[in-house]
Amino acid sequence: MTCPICERDADTRFRPFCSKRCADIDLGKWLDGTYAVPSRDPEDIEAAIEAVEQASVKPH
Ligand SMILES: [Zn+2]
């Protein structure tokens, strides 16, 4: 099984994701409703990762 976010090998602790980071990104996508428009653009994935990291640094 591969991570649906970055397509690396999944980690059994976070499956189907490879890491908590990707699990958080997936959760964020659901919350934002961005799954309505799935994107395979790597830049979008990078942006999603940055958004999660910034959200975790600056909780509101
Ligand atoms: Zn991943």
Image (tube, grey):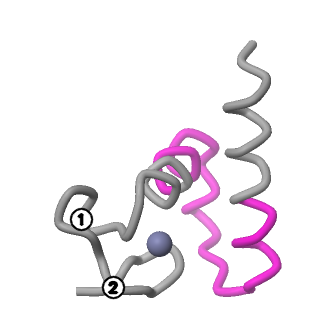
For mark 1, give the secondary structure: loop
User: Is residue 13 shown in magenta?
Assistant: no
Q: Residue at x 59, y 49 (%)?
A: 33
Q: Provide the residue designation for mark 1.
A: 15
At label 1, which amino acid type do we have?
Arg
At label 2, which amino acid type do we have?
Asp
Q: Residue at x 58, y 62 (%)?
A: 36
Pointer 2 residue Cβ closer than 8 Å to ligand 1: no
Q: Which residues are magenta?
A: 26-48
- Where residue 32 sits in the image (x, y, percent)? 63, 43
Indicate left or right for 28 with 17 as reference.
right
Closer to us: 8 or 33: 8
State the predominant SS element of the stretch in magenta.
Answer: helix
Marking on residue 9: 2
Few, some or many residues within 10 Å of mark 1 (<14, 14–19, 20+): some
In the picture, residue 17 is in which quadrant?
A: bottom left
For mark 2, give the secondary structure: loop
Indicate left or right for 3 with 33 as reference.
left
Q: Residue at x 42, y 51 (%)?
A: 20
Indicate left or right for 40 with 13 as reference.
right
Which is nearer the N-term, disc 1 or disc 2?
A: 2
Q: Which residue of the protein is positioned furthest toward the left in this rendering?
A: 12
- Where residue 53 sits in the image (x, y, percent)? 72, 44
User: Is residue 28 shown in magenta?
Assistant: yes
On screen, residue 31 above or below 25: above
